[in-house]
Amino acid sequence: MKRSGRDRRLFLLTIAVALLLTILPVPAVLSPFKPYWVALAMVYWSLETRDIVSLGAAFLIGLVLDILTGSQMGLHALSLVVMVFLVQRFRSRLRFFPPWQQALSVLGLLVNDRIILIWITMLMSEPAPTWKYWLPPLIGMALWPWIFLLLDRVRARQRRKKP
Amino acid sequence: MATHIYDKNLTHKDSSDSSRWFGGEGARTARLMMYILLAIVLMVMDQRGHYVPRVRSVMEQAFEPLFLLVSWPAQALRSLDRRTRARGDLIEENQLLIEERLKMVASVQTQSALEHENQRLRTLLQATGGMTYNFQFAELIRVDQDPFSHKIWIDRGADQQVTPGQAVIDGLGIVGQVEEVHRHSATVRLISDPDHALPVQINRTGLRTVAYGTGATSHLLMPNVPLQADISSGDLIVTSGLGDRFPTGFPVGEVERVERNSGDTFATVYLRPFAALDRGREVLLIEPRVIPPTPRTEQP
């Protein structure tokens, strides 16, 4: 019980950092490369813990992200709910993949997410995005092993500090 | 093999556990559907402007300090850069600025002569009265992440008398218009936003038309120019002032390319905007102000 409380605090901290990274101003050259930080954090936590990330939490975090990025209200909420659902559905399989295979699954999740978003924006008759639109999933995949290792390390240390 | 069995066991445990917490796979899918439906309803309400935009505006205001916090490192870097500039550079820059100023003063003098003449002619014509503009300086604090809506956030808001609909320019041309006003910040929709339409006219011939955003900051589109209209690449496009949003006569851009297909009714004209839509850091807000049509005597 205690352990899950600690994880919950760490989860909220991770999400807060991911949100700040999302709105951090970067030079215009780098901005198309910006990964979907919040999604990466959500994937990690719904993969590694069972009872912290719920669909409702994903929805709420998505709404906050919508407000912060100025996108259509509900757009990121939808995207995160679908992503968390998929991770939870295939959790037992994803968990025992070797890292490179896991990174590929993350790429699949992020690309799937982009397809959903593009479909919605097409329905709202916005113009089609350029090829740069597909860069963030690739960056996300490249970053995944590092994020995974970092968060695992932090959690292991916390566990050791307070047994 | 061993890991496989382990995996299987865990899968089993997992599903029994989730059935305790979520009431089985079916219920979870139902919950997913519910959230998706909720998200779609929200999106439609936001699109149609029902209620949601107001809630969002309030929430954005609540998150305002966060943006100021996040933009702090960049601003600190810039001020550090200013402070640590070498002395030699400063002297050189100063020299340049003095020369620049002299040139400016000269051009302002001719300008003011022109202005007087214009003013006299207007009174003669008993025209609607000259408009002069006050400018308010504002700095960008954030650029929208969404590739489908081109918005920027500026550091002036209701406290500085910013009002929705105000035109925004930079040193080169029209940038956009103020959309939402918060206390210390405001959002500006850029002319390159796919939903933005700007009433313009071709400076050389006076032909009026509308320039639409394309979602790319590199060009705007004028799809309603008659096929036989006198327009060619290099023509200067200025605001026409129709629609009462943008003041008249501000430069917008120059014609880049004219496509005339003999089957169509209209020519398609591509326009390169002058304003630094994707790289500027400072903008000016225009406050329209009517002055009485008497010649001004103040010194520049």
Image: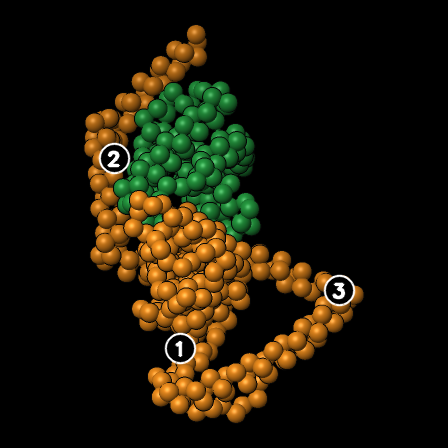
The furthest residue to the right: B88
SS class, disc 3: helix
Q: Which residue is mark 2?
A: B32
Q: Is residue B261 visible?
A: yes
- The amino acid type found where label 3 is placed reads Asp
Identified at 55% across, 80% down, the residue is B111
Q: Position of residue B143 (x, y in %)?
A: 46, 55
Q: Which residue is mark 1?
A: B288
Q: Position of residue B112 (x, y in %)?
A: 54, 84
Number of other residues with Cα within 10 Å of mark 2, as a class: few under 14, some 14 to 19, many 20 or more: some
Mark 1–mark 2 Cα distance, whole angstroms, equals 51 Å
Q: Which residue is mark 3?
A: B89
Q: Name the colouring of the figure.
A: by chain
What's the colour of chain B in the image? Answer: orange
Q: Where does the N terminus of chain A fall, quadrant-wise?
A: top left
- The amino acid type found where label 2 is placed reads Leu
Identified at 58% across, 82% down, the residue is B110
- The amino acid type found where label 1 is placed reads Pro
